[in-house]
Amino acid sequence: MLRIAVPNKGSLADPASDMLAEAGYRRRRGRELVLADPDNDVEFFFLRPRDIAVYVGSGTVDVGITGRDLLLDSDVEAVEHRALGFARSTFRFAAPSGQMREVADIAGKRVATSYDVLVGTYLRERGIEATVVHLDGAVESSVRLGVADVVADVVETGSTLRAAGLETFGEPILESEAVLIRSTTAEATNGVSVLDRRLQGVLVARDYVLVDYDVPADKLEAAVAITPGFESPTVSPLHNGESFAVRSLVRRDATNRVMDELYDVGARAILVTSLLACRI
Ligand SMILES: Nc1ncnc2c1ncn2[C@@H]1O[C@H](COP(=O)(O)OP(=O)(O)OP(=O)(O)O)[C@@H](O)[C@H]1O
Ligand SMILES: O=P(O)(O)OC[C@H]1O[C@H](OP(=O)(O)OP(=O)(O)O)[C@H](O)[C@@H]1O
Ligand SMILES: [Mg+2]
């Protein structure tokens, strides 16, 4: 039975549970710590997001969902297996507006963060000596309250930083999102492949739509060039013998541009359908 660690709190918890439910797994109804899903031959362990890499790294659970930033901060024997496309954020340095221009300006300063390993490694690799001050959260308040000169934290919209009178400086330390992780030592079991294929299916069903259209024979090549699909579109002859029906996957965010382009080259009866699930 595959053992899967799932975040029980914070920004990762709800979208991780939604994704697993879309992939056909049993959903947690209450506050259970462990949930068996015998129909799918898996068992879920609901754990703090920061602890998930530790459990997976030790091999006591096979795989887990966590943030890339949390994985890199944990210094354990676990690796990223697949990016999952939610809880996207950047990890950045910030200081009171106008005070810092580049990362080198951090030398000799105090940096508040919940991600000591990530920040310590980043500064050491650049030969910058600074004091890392560990805080559990609400890191943005540390400068105003006088325990640090600079913060290094998760930024999504930037509104928490702005509210604290801080602005980012230097290059982003990291682009993060939710990731499926697995132990570097554990063998890749069949159960991991099934989970991974199911999650990939959810990602494709979220990001792509199915487009069908009719097109005259002399416009077929121009239309197919607009909708190349994953491998090659399905092309079927229409009964009138003069036109073709084409079916292809198209990125959801490009749907309307693609429909306009298809119409311009002569395609008609252009229909768009959402995917419920898929295996690529
Ligand atoms: N505002 C946000 N937008 C997107 N992702 C975020 C945001 N805040 C945190 N994350 C991401 O979510 C993951 C876990 O962070 P989260 O803040 O949920 O955990 P935590 O700070 O340990 O828990 P809590 O805030 O509940 O104490 C990290 O990978 C982080 O990058
Ligand atoms: O750029 P924004 O959209 O403002 O989001 C970023 C903020 O969200 C997270 O905080 P969270 O709510 O998890 O609180 P925490 O700092 O206590 O973890 C993160 O630590 C930042 O503070
Ligand atoms: Mg948080």
Image (spheres, rainbow, N blue to C red):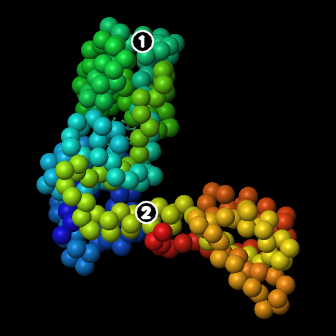
Q: Determine the secondary structure under disc 1.
A: helix
Reply above or below: 146 against 276: above
Quadrant hosting residue 14 = bottom left
User: Could you tell me residue 72's position as x and y percent?
Assistant: 30, 37
Q: Looking at the rendering, in which quadrant would you find the N terminus?
A: bottom left
Callout 1 environment at 10 Å: few (<14), some (14 to 19), or many (20+)? Answer: some
Q: Residue at x 73, y 62 (%)?
A: 226
User: Could you tell me residue 146's position as x and y percent?
Assistant: 31, 14
Q: Is residue 157 left or right of residue 123?
A: right
Q: Is residue 73 left or right of residue 232?
A: left
- Ligand 1 shows up in which quadrant of the image? top left
User: Looking at the image, which is closer to me, 143 or 121?
Assistant: 121
Reply above or below: 130 against 114: above
**Which kind of residue does numbered mark 1 sit on?**
Ala
Q: Is residue 84 left or right of residue 262?
A: left
Q: Is residue 211 in sight in this rendering?
A: yes
Q: Is residue 37 left or right of residue 218?
A: left
Q: Residue at x 42, y 12 (%)?
A: 104
Tell me the distance, in whole angstroms, between the alpha carbons under discs 1 and 2.
Answer: 40 Å
Callout 2 environment at 10 Å: few (<14), some (14 to 19), or many (20+)? Answer: many
Q: Would you say the beta carbon of the disc 1 residue lies within 8 angstroms of ligand 2?
A: no
Q: Residue at x 80, y 76 (%)?
A: 215
Q: Residue at x 37, y 17 (%)?
A: 126
Q: Which residue is mark 2?
A: 200
Quadrant hosting residue 266 = bottom right
**Which kind of residue does numbered mark 2 sit on?**
Gln
Q: Determine the secondary structure under disc 2.
A: helix
Q: Which residue is mark 1?
A: 104
User: Could you tell me residue 211's position as x and y percent?
Assistant: 66, 71
